[in-house]
Amino acid sequence: MTIHQMLTELQTWFNPSQELLTKAKQSKITTKNNATFKQLVDGWMEGMFDEDPRLMYNEITFLLK
């Protein structure tokens, strides 16, 4: 999974700026090449962020900085 795909999924709850979406699309971060992002996605799949999806959103925006 790419960071752009994850950010697109999070659009269900949040409205990321066009700048952030562009940054995510240009990013090379994937679950295959970034251990931190892989852990986040694994946690997302396991329901770790169900109570507060903003935590996932914040983590992703931090990775894109």
Image: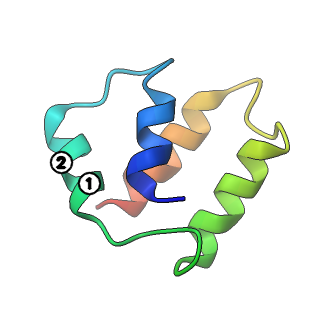
**Residue 4 relative to residue 32: left or right:** left
At 21% from the left and 54% from the top, the residue drawn is 23
The amino acid on which the numbered mark 1 sits, given as a three-letter code, is: Lys
Residue placed under numbered mark 2 in the picture: 22
Q: Position of residue 35 (x, y in %)?
A: 62, 77
User: Are the two marked residues, 2 and 1, in contact with CB atoms closer than 8 angstroms?
Assistant: yes
Number of numbered discs = 2
The amino acid on which the numbered mark 2 sits, given as a three-letter code, is: Thr
Number of residues whose C-alpha sits closer than 10 Å to that of mark 1, classed few (under 14), some (14–19) or many (20 or more): some
Q: Helix, strand or loop at disc 1?
A: helix
State the residue in front, 51 or 8: 8
With respect to residue 56, does 25 lie above or below?
below
The C terminus appears in which quarter of the rendering?
bottom left
Which coloring applies here? rainbow
Residue placed under numbered mark 1 in the picture: 25
Q: Position of residue 36 (x, y in %)?
A: 61, 70
